[in-house]
Image (cartoon, grey):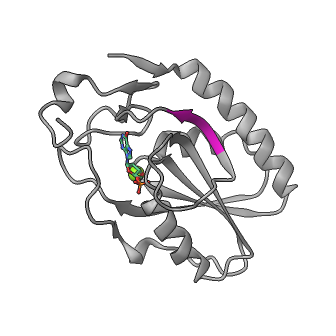
Amino acid sequence: MQILITAERIQERLDELAVEIKQHYREQPITIVGVLTGCLMFLADLVRRLDMPVRLALIQASSYRGAVTRPGELQVQAELVPDLRGRHVLLLDDILDTGRTLGHLVGQLRGLEPASLRVGVLLRKEGRQELPLEPDYCGFRIPDLFVIGYGLDFNDEYRHLPHVAVLPAATSSTTDRA
Ligand code: IMP
Ligand code: MG
């Protein structure tokens, strides 16, 4: 499997992102809202670097169902969305691809009247974005490849890998990308 970003490089970059986040919020309390399930590793590793007041929340939003590498219709589980009125909110997701997921969630969370709303992603895929959304924090820019590991899945597998890798062609050739 071709490793695109090593576990070590991810951890180094999280150190830098944590510094950026702490410098911006300057001890103001924030609520980090993670997008399940892909955010899990990114969120868990990042929040342990934030020595500041933090609340955590998770929301479920998914556009990929089963063994596919192209998004379908976005489904958000509204009952998981926390009360964010007056809070500084940082929305975290694993990857910015077309931007549809984060674009939708940003719109939804803004409606809850947070004091501020910022967006952080571990990865940003080049040349795929359909919506004009600039993440405030971005770990890495990657080429247009289907990647797995460090939270990212293919058919719910590979999320546990400590690095980011390219999905092997043998697997993806059985999908709709072939
Ligand atoms: P978007 O709505 O097109 O920006 O897609 C965002 C969501 O699609 C992410 O939260 C991921 O769950 C999923 N996704 C996009 N690209 C990949 C990939 O290369 N590997 C695994 N999941 C991906
Ligand atoms: Mg996701």
Residue at horizontal 81 percent and vertical 48 percent from the top:
22
Residue at horizontal 79 percent and vertical 44 percent from the top:
20
- Decide: is 79 above or below 75: below
* Residue 168 image-quadrant placement: top left
Residue 158 horizontal/vertical position (percent): 31, 32
Residue at horizontal 53 percent and vertical 40 percent from the top:
123
122 or 146: which is nearer to us?
146
Is residue 56 something that shows in the picture?
yes
Is 146 covered by the magenta stretch? Answer: no
Residue at horizontal 57 percent and vertical 61 percent from the top:
132
Residue 135 horizontal/vertical position (percent): 63, 53
73 or 157: which is nearer to us?
73
| Count of marks overlaid on the render | 0
Q: Quadrant of the C terminus?
A: top left
- Decide: is 2 above or below 173: above
Relative placement, left or right, of 144 versus 14 is left
Residue 35 horizontal/vertical position (percent): 47, 57
Q: Main secondary structure of the magenta part?
A: strand
Residue 1 horizontal/vertical position (percent): 32, 16
Range covered by the magenta-colored residues: 138-142
Is residue 37 something that shows in the picture?
no
Relative placement, left or right, of 144 versus 106 is left
Residue lying at the far left of the rendered structure: 174
